[in-house]
């Protein structure tokens, strides 16, 4: 799944570097791939409170989505999600999100949340979430400055 994650997020990390420029990116995003790789390992660990679902196409894993449910607050959260670029745009992400929303509800969640980027590289993810019915958004911005 790490190779899938790396392929899916290559464009995202490139977009981030292009947006902030090389000076800031060299510091702010130097460890982004390694940090995300560790996050995926942690999410997939046996003791994790996250659930992971995969999409298979042609006998290969082409997508994954993680999620968790806080039973006390009854809020579910869609976590790290990826679809391999070779099969992007075929509705795989939307179907994965729809499935985990059903699972969240079955686990007692009454609200689902997801965080995603507002930059152009995240447009496919935003479309998948919106097509799955996730739409109420609170805008958020990260600002950077070289010192």
Image: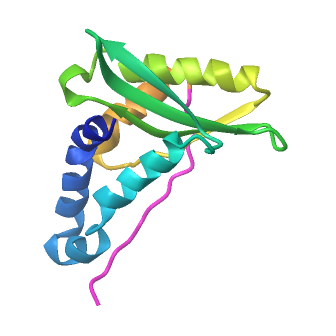
**Above or below, 69 relative to 83:** below
Q: Is residue 142 magenta?
A: yes
Viewer-nearest residue: 140 or 68: 68
Question: Which color scheme is applied?
Answer: rainbow
Asked if one can make out residue 131 in the rendered structure from this viewpoint, the answer is: no
Majority secondary structure of magenta residues: loop
Q: Is residue 122 magenta?
A: no
Q: Position of residue 112 (x, y in %)?
A: 66, 34
* Apparent side of residue 125 relative to residue 79 in the rendered image (left or right): left
Q: Residue furthest top?
A: 58
Viewer-nearest residue: 76 or 37: 37
Q: Position of residue 65 (x, y in %)?
A: 47, 31
* Apparent side of residue 25 relative to residue 107 in the rendered image (left or right): left
**Above or below, 31 relative to 1:** below
Q: Quadrant of residue 125?
A: top left
Residue lying at 43% horizontally and 23% vertically, measured from the top left: 54
Q: Position of residue 118 (x, y in %)?
A: 38, 49
Residue lying at 31% horizontally and 49% vertically, measured from the top left: 119
Residue range in magenta is 134-147
* Apparent side of residue 56 relative to residue 70 in the rendered image (left or right): left
């Amino acid at each position: 799944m790490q190779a899938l994650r790396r392929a899916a997020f290559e464009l995202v990390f490139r977009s981030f570097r292009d947006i902030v420029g090389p000076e800031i990116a060299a510091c702010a995003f130097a460890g982004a791939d390694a940090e995300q790789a560790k996050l995926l390992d942690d999410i997939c660990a046996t003791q994790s409170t996250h659930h992971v679902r995969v999409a298979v196409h042609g006998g290969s894993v082409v997508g994954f989505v993680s999620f968790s449910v806080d039973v006390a607050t009854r809020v579910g959260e869609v976590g790290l999600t990826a679809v391999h670029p070779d099969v992007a745009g075929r509705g795989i992400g939307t179907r994965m999100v729809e499935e985990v929303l059903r699972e969240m509800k079955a686990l007692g969640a009454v609200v689902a949340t997801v965080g995603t980027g507002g930059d152009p590289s995240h447009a496919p993810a935003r479309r998948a979430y919106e097509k799955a019915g996730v739409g109420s958004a609170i805008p958020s911005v990260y600002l950077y400055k070289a010192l």
